[in-house]
């Protein structure tokens, strides 16, 4: 990169994902993909596995993409983009190769392929658009689904209410392989978003962009609050914004104080069943992660310090 960093105002405005696609109203994924492709530009080849993105952007025989677009099997994103990149390199062509996969195709089904591409340091950009479940096939749980969330495979019953496991830390899986660049992004922080995509484009080797993309249908939310959900996710610690470049971690945004996670949960139907005990369990887990992320010198994130950090208001009575 040279000169002034790109901002949301100075970024290219030439859409590579054009209007008329089939995304739901309020879809965080379409917003994220549109802005990623604006920055990457027309000299780009896109690969997508089975996902919402594939379905709403490229239903045969039409496509909402202005750039070349390839689709193969669900688990193959890392492998296919590695092959495309090698093919262009053999031809002496400088083309940006990007894979855009959901959390199911990254955290679970496609984990072996993305791990292989990262370990080989293939010259590709891997974008995980994370809506925290297999939304395309009816909202089944993934390794990204948060604790307590309803999905069709973590239903709410009398004994078990929603998913009982916490979200997998995919960024740690990727950065453990010493990739040149990995970053988390939020559509609610547009300048941070733009800067990270611009930086990823300029770096050689394997680059990983992890974007939270709220889903109106799977999260059971109003389309008008997608941006607010993305913002609250960061303010409550459900999502953190940072980058790791050549092994060096840099926090790119830190909230002034940690908001209670209930402020985030109560806006989503997938959490409406959660009891006081489950909210406290999630809050405790978030506090540990918050302290580990923002206050790495704190021991275990336990005790009164943790409680003060977690709650800006009254304790939860459940949703």
Image: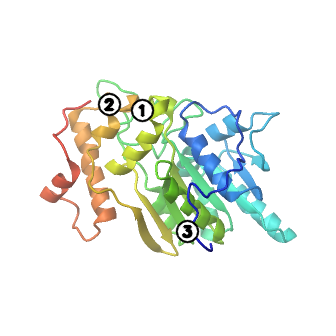
Q: Residue at x 34, y 50 (%)?
A: 235
Residue 120 appears in which quarter of the rendering?
bottom right
Screen quadrant of the C terminus: top left
For label 3, the SS is strand
163 w.r.t. 199: above or below: above
Where is residue 164 drawn, in percent x and y?
35, 40
Mark 3, Cα crowd under 10 Å, few <14 / some 14-19 / many 20+, is many
63 w.r.t. 178: above or below: above
Q: Which mark is residue 99?
A: none
Residue 60 appears in which quarter of the rendering?
top right
Where is residue 152 drawn, in percent x and y?
47, 28
Most extreme residue toward the right is: 91
Task: Give the alpha-carbon distance from disc 1 to disc 3, as whole Å.
Answer: 34 Å
Lower position in the chain sequence, tag 2 or tag 3: 2
Pointer 2 with pointer 1, Cβ within 8 A:
yes
Mark 2, Cα crowd under 10 Å, few <14 / some 14-19 / many 20+, is few
Could you tell whether 123 is left or right of 31 in the image? right
Q: Which residue is mark 1?
A: 154
Q: Which residue is mark 2?
A: 160
Lower position in the chain sequence, tag 2 or tag 1: 1
Task: Give the alpha-carbon distance from disc 2 to disc 1, as whole Å.
Answer: 8 Å
Can residue 175 be seen in the rendering of this structure? yes
Residue 20 appears in which quarter of the rendering?
top right
Q: Which residue is mark 3?
A: 181
Where is residue 199 drawn, in percent x and y?
59, 67
């Amino acid at each position: 990169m040279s000169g002034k960093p790109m901002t949301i105002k100075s970024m290219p405005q030439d859409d590579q994902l054009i209007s008329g696609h089939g995304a739901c109203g309020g879809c965080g994924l379409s917003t994220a993909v549109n802005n990623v492709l604006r920055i990457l530009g027309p000299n780009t080849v896109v690969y997508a596995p089975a996902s919402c993105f594939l379905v709403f952007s490229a239903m045969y025989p039409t496509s909402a993409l202005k750039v070349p677009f390839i689709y193969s099997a669900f688990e193959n994103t890392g492998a296919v983009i590695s092959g495309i990149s090698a093919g262009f390199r053999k031809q002496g062509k400088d083309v940006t190769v990007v894979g855009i996969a959901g959390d199911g195709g990254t955290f679970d089904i496609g984990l072996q392929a993305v791990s292989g591409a990262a370990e080989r340091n293939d010259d590709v950009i891997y974008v995980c658009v994370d809506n925290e479940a297999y939304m395309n096939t009816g909202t089944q749980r993934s390794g990204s689904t948060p604790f307590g969330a309803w999905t069709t495979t973590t239903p709410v019953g009398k004994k078990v209410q929603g998913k009982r496991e916490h979200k997998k830390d995919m960024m740690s899986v990727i950065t453990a392989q010493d990739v040149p660049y990995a970053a988390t992004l939020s559509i609610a922080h547009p300048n941070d978003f733009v800067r990270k995509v611009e930086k990823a484009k300029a770096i050689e080797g394997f680059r990983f962009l992890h974007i939270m993309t709220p889903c109106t249908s799977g999260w059971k939310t109003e389309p008008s609050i997608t941006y607010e959900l993305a913002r609250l996710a960061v303010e409550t610690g459900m999502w953190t914004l940072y980058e790791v470049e050549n092994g060096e971690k840099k926090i790119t945004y830190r909230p002034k104080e940690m908001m209670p996670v209930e402020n985030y949960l109560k806006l989503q139907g997938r959490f409406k069943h959660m009891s006081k005990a489950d909210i406290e369990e999630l809050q405790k887990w978030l506090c540990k992660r918050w302290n580990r992320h923002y206050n790495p010198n704190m021991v275990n994130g336990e005790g009164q310090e943790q409680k003060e950090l977690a709650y800006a208001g009254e304790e939860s009575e459940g949703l």
